[in-house]
């Protein structure tokens, strides 16, 4: 088993890139298909509806996009730094996925705006009607956080 940086991070980087790509593709689709207040009812309470979120989770902190964007960069850097010290490949994979999702929302906040860098809104479109509207990146971030907690946080590498 390779222990150098590229060997340890190849799969987490690929997973993060996959999450980022799928997130951006689904948002691109949503912006095109759900404009003008159109909704698509799928089943039970699940529907697709376009929402532009300039705040944080659950649309809290409306208008604080630049601050939220900088906080996201800091959290991503911290996660990567801590995960780099772990011996657990599951933790690195999870961090790769979470960073991919966070980067997807960060890109929205950075470039989906006429108000300058970090003035944009995150594209949300999955509407359960009993939970705040979210996107693929949000789902991956939440599931990733649960997985990190489930596995006992990010454990440091054993000194050998």
Image (cartoon, grey):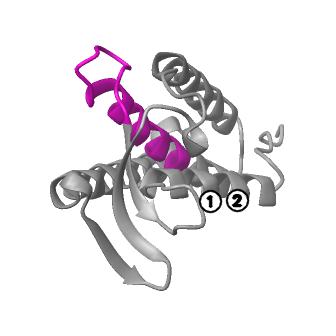
* Residue 89 in the image: above or below residue 127: above
Left or right of 11? Residue 108 is: left
The answer to whether any part of residue 138 appears in the image is yes
* Residues packed near mark 2 inside 10 Å, few (<14), some (14 to 19) or many (20 plus): some
* Residues packed near mark 1 inside 10 Å, few (<14), some (14 to 19) or many (20 plus): some
Residue name at image x 42 percent, y 32 percent: 106
Q: Tell me whether circle 1 and circle 2 mark residues in contact (CB < 8 Å).
A: yes
Marks 1/2: CA distance? 6 Å
Residue 29 is situated, as x and y percent measured from the top left of the image, at: 20, 58
The answer to whether any part of residue 2 appears in the image is no
- Secondary structure under badge 2? helix
Quarter-of-image position of residue 40: bottom left
Which residue range is magenta in the image? 96-121
- Secondary structure under badge 1? helix
Name the foreground residue: 150 vs 132.
132
Quarter-of-image position of residue 53: top left
* Residue 60 in the image: above or below residue 116: below
Looking at this view, name the residue that lies furthest to the left. Answer: 32
Residue name at image x 50 percent, y 78 percent: 45
Q: Magenta region, mostly helix, strand or loop?
A: helix
Please tell me whether residue 12 belongs to the stretch shown in magenta. Answer: no
Residue name at image x 28 percent, y 14 percent: 116
Foreground tag (1 vs 2):
1
Determine which residue is flagged by label 2. Answer: 147
Determine which residue is flagged by label 1. Answer: 143
Residue 115 is situated, as x and y percent measured from the top left of the image, at: 28, 16
Please tell me whether residue 116 belongs to the stretch shown in magenta. Answer: yes
Residue 73 is situated, as x and y percent measured from the top left of the image, at: 52, 24
Name the foreground residue: 112 vs 153.
112
| Viewport quadrant of the C terminus | top right
Residue 65 is situated, as x and y percent measured from the top left of the image, at: 47, 23
């Amino acid at each position: 088993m390779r222990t150098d940086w590229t060997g340890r991070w190849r799969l987490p980087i690929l997973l993060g890139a996959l999450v980022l790509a799928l997130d951006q593709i689904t948002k691109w689709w949503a912006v095109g298909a759900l404009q003008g207040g159109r909704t698509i009812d799928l089943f039970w309470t699940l529907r697709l509806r376009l929402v532009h979120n300039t705040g944080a989770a659950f649309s809290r902190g409306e208008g604080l996009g630049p601050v939220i964007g900088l906080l996201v960069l800091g959290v991503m850097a911290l996660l990567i730094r801590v995960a780099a010290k772990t011996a657990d490949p599951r933790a690195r994979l999870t961090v790769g996925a979470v960073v991919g999702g966070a980067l997807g929302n960060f890109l929205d906040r950075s470039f989906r705006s006429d108000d300058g860098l970090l003035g944009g809104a995150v594209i949300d479109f999955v509407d359960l009607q009993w939970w705040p509207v979210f996107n693929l990146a949000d789902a991956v971030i939440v599931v990733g956080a649960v997985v990190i907690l489930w596995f006992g946080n990010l454990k440091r590498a054993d000194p050998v």
